[in-house]
Amino acid sequence: MVKDKTIEPWVCQCGTHNPEYKLLCKQCGRRREEEKNWKGTHGKTFAIIGASNHAKHEREKDDYYATEPRVIQELFSVEEFSNNIWEPACGEKHLSSEMEWLGKKVLSSDKVARVHGVVAYDFLSEKTWHFNGDIITNPPYKYAMEFIEKAYKQINHGRKIAMFLKITFLEGVKRHHFFKAYPPKTVHVYSSRRKCALNGDFDNTGGSPTCYAWYVWEKGYQGETTLKWLK
Ligand SMILES: C[S@@+](CC[C@H](N)C(=O)[O-])C[C@H]1O[C@@H](n2cnc3c(N)ncnc32)[C@H](O)[C@@H]1O
């Protein structure tokens, strides 16, 4: 488990007591106040840089919706992953922090580095990195197919890609062809709703009308897709 000893246990606005090593509330996903106020400087690509001053509209154009961190524990309860994980569209690290808390070594990158510890890297247009591990993210939905294709190029045979996507990703003519080339090994459909908050603002996000699923690919797998359900 990755722990930051400099951080004290804290109580979230929602009343939940969180241990010192959690940067995001384990119940509602809110970020610790101190972390929200962290300001860093812009670095260049591939440098680990700090929080940026991106205006709200800039963030929206990048399709920034933070995901409830609990979806990671739910995924890990049904799938095995490498110790090395890459979260390539990590936003403010809601999923990354949860994976770190569960003991994974996580590379957190995003086109927009919003918080400390995020590598500025455009997953679609920058040079392909070879990554020895699995890739897990909730990608920008409109580029989900591109993210999956690029992720295939970055990882080794037998490694996994897990994408948190709307159930409607299953439909569509374009995606019909895509799924023939890249059949997911398993799709875990949520029976109840999970929240994604615009700009990470869980305070002003109500219940979600959207059904999500974890789509899991294994590089090299060419069989049928298994459909399973998560509560
Ligand atoms: C739906 S949000 C998810 C954020 C995070 N994965 C989570 O679940 O909390 C999508 C993220 O993709 C990032 N993004 C958009 N285009 C990108 C690109 N080409 N390369 C890397 N990240 C990108 C956005 O900045 C945004 O943070």
Image (cartoon, rainbow, N blue to C red):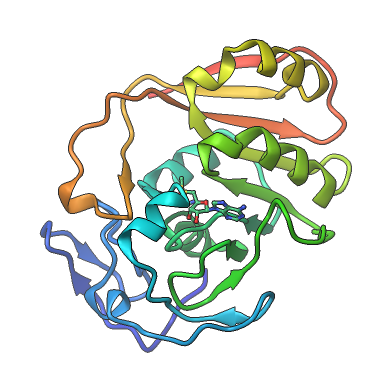
* Left or right placement of residue 74 versus residue 215 in this view: left
Q: Where is residue 111 shown, x and y percent of the image?
A: 57, 61
Residue 196 or residue 177, whichever sits in front: 177
Instruction: State whether residue 175 appears in this view.
Output: yes
Q: Where is residue 3 shown, x and y percent of the image?
A: 46, 77
Question: Where 204 falls versus 34 (above or below)?
Answer: above
> Looking at the rendering, in which quadrant would you find the C terminus?
top left
Question: Where 4 falls versus 219 (above or below)?
Answer: below
> Going 12% across and 63% down the picture, which residue do you hit?
13
Location of residue 19 (image quadrant): bottom left
> Going 52% across and 57% down the picture, which residue do you hit?
90
Question: Where 89 falls versus 230 (above or below)?
Answer: below
Location of residue 10 (image quadrant): bottom left
* Left or right placement of residue 223 versus residue 103 in this view: right
The number of numbered discs placed on residues in the rendered structure image is 0
Instruction: State whether residue 64 appears in this view.
Output: no
Q: Where is residue 46 shown, x and y percent of the image?
A: 69, 75
Residue 203 or residue 186, whichever sits in front: 203
Residue 116 or residue 189, whichever sits in front: 116
Q: Where is residue 78 shown, x and y percent of the image?
A: 56, 33
> Going 33% across and 34% down the picture, which residue do you hit?
194
